[in-house]
Image: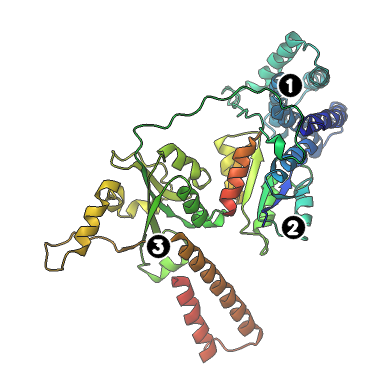
Amino acid sequence: MSISVLAVDDSRTMRDMITLALVSEGFEVHLAEDGQHGLEVLDDIEPDVIITDINMPRLDGFGFIDAVRARDDARTIPILVLTTESSTDLKTRARNAGATGWIVKPFAQDKLVRALRMVTG
Amino acid sequence: MSDPMQEIMASFFVECEELHEALVDALQTMADGESDVETINVAFRAVHSIKGGAGAFGLNELVEFAHQFETVMDACRSGALVPDDALHALFLRCADMLSDLIRCSRDGEEIDSGTSAALIAELSGYAGGPGHDEPAPVIDFQPMTLDLLDLGGGLDVLPDLPLLDAIEPDPAAVGVTVEFRPEGELYESGNEPLFLLKTLADLGPCEIDCAFAPPETIQDLDRPGGRLTWTIRIGGDATPAAVQEVFEFAEGLCHLKVMSSGGPALPVLERTLDDMEDDDDEALAAPPPLAQIPAAREARSEPRAAAPQPKTSPTVRVDLDRIERLVNLVGELVINQAMLSQSIAEQNIAPNSPVSAGLDEFMQLTRNI
């Protein structure tokens, strides 16, 4: 059974790249354009893992993670932050919001796949 | 068959045009003094998204310029920098430069590096105030690698990419011993210890022990985590670095020690919670190296009349599948207990009734498990 992924990113290019990287590895990919859209998608699906950007319109990544962790139906879903920065400060903020881990953009396909497989078992 | 990466790159440049248009609109609004908080956010996100996409395609000059551009804009949106007319004008000139860099990157034209460098220097002047004199964060450039043969049809001609040098295994490595004690924060972050153990098992043949520290007071029950200490001995070519990579996301959320088996203990990689300082560190600091395990087993099988045994914590070795089943069953138990509690609450049953008392005991037992 394939691993279901919700990828939340306001960049169309990033959404395309995530889709390309994961579909070829057998993942089922759902997309959202910002945090608010991500929450709406979560009303319809229950992904095994979430990937989210940080800087997004309407609801940014930190707010999105907060909101996901507040939902009874999604608070244990692993959430990986996909970010261009790798600073300790950002990791700390993401972790405080409830993120499971982080992947630095631009990402290597094998590292992303490995991380997703690890956090979903 | 078209190259999917080329298609995404073409789409990226179209997106860049849209983002650049949004950037210029936002910058013009700011220059006109009609901006609000969201205006600078729109401008920042436009440059940030261009930078992110450019990084994926290795467009380094575009990335470098966008990075410095967004750094100054980030200072503006955080309030650390209040833009004046000169900075507004600089932003608009930078937007023009960004447009040129995008066009040159798309069309393969030569980039005007001199103008780009001059603008970066001007931007650095704004970003170089107190507290901003540290070097720009190093972006981890990892050009995305894709298995194009698995994309449904593949390509007729694959690009001739250079091969990376093979990483030679460390001949000194004879296995690794890991001590891992998940704290409550690890569970709350969505990390799952069982998955970490499974990933470790992928590194080489594993032996896993688990020591359980029962709660000493009733208050301890309110503190999740910190009760199970896993000792994992990994053979084969496993290295401490590989183990450390597995625990990357657990950094700061657990007690972790990684030791080369048979060698000296490596420094503790993570210790974050103050209350862990009270734990029995000495007992945890020196688990038996792999070579001593058979001897230890023999010692345990000696009759009780033999020489006095050192006081050790009881341990049990279990199969990972059994642990997974146990974790799932406990999860079901907790869910059923919560449903039962809700049903009783809805029935308005008195708290001192036998049913409520029984449920309290059930909850207590569940917590203990």
Percent across and percent down for residue B76 are 72, 30
Q: Depth-wise, is mark 3 or mark 1 nearer the camera?
A: 3
Residue closer to the observer: A62 or A111: A111
Instruction: Give the residue type at disc 2.
Output: Leu
Helix, strand or loop at label 3? It is: loop
Q: Which residue is mark 3?
A: B318
Percent across and percent down for residue B103 are 83, 19
Please name the colour scheme applied to the rendered image: rainbow
Percent across and percent down for residue B138 are 59, 26
Percent across and percent down for residue B67 are 69, 25
Mark earlier in primary sequence (3, 1): 1
Q: Quadrant of residue A60?
A: top right
Give how far apart the Cα atoms at labels 2 and 1 are: 35 Å
Q: Depth-wise, is mark 2 or mark 3 nearer the camera?
A: 3
Please indicate whether residue A51 sits to the left or right of residue B164 in the image.
Answer: right
Instruction: Give the residue type at disc 1.
Output: Leu
Q: Where's the N terminus of chain B, which quadrant? A: top right
Give how far apart the Cα atoms at labels 3 and 1 are: 54 Å
Q: Which residue is mark 2?
A: A42
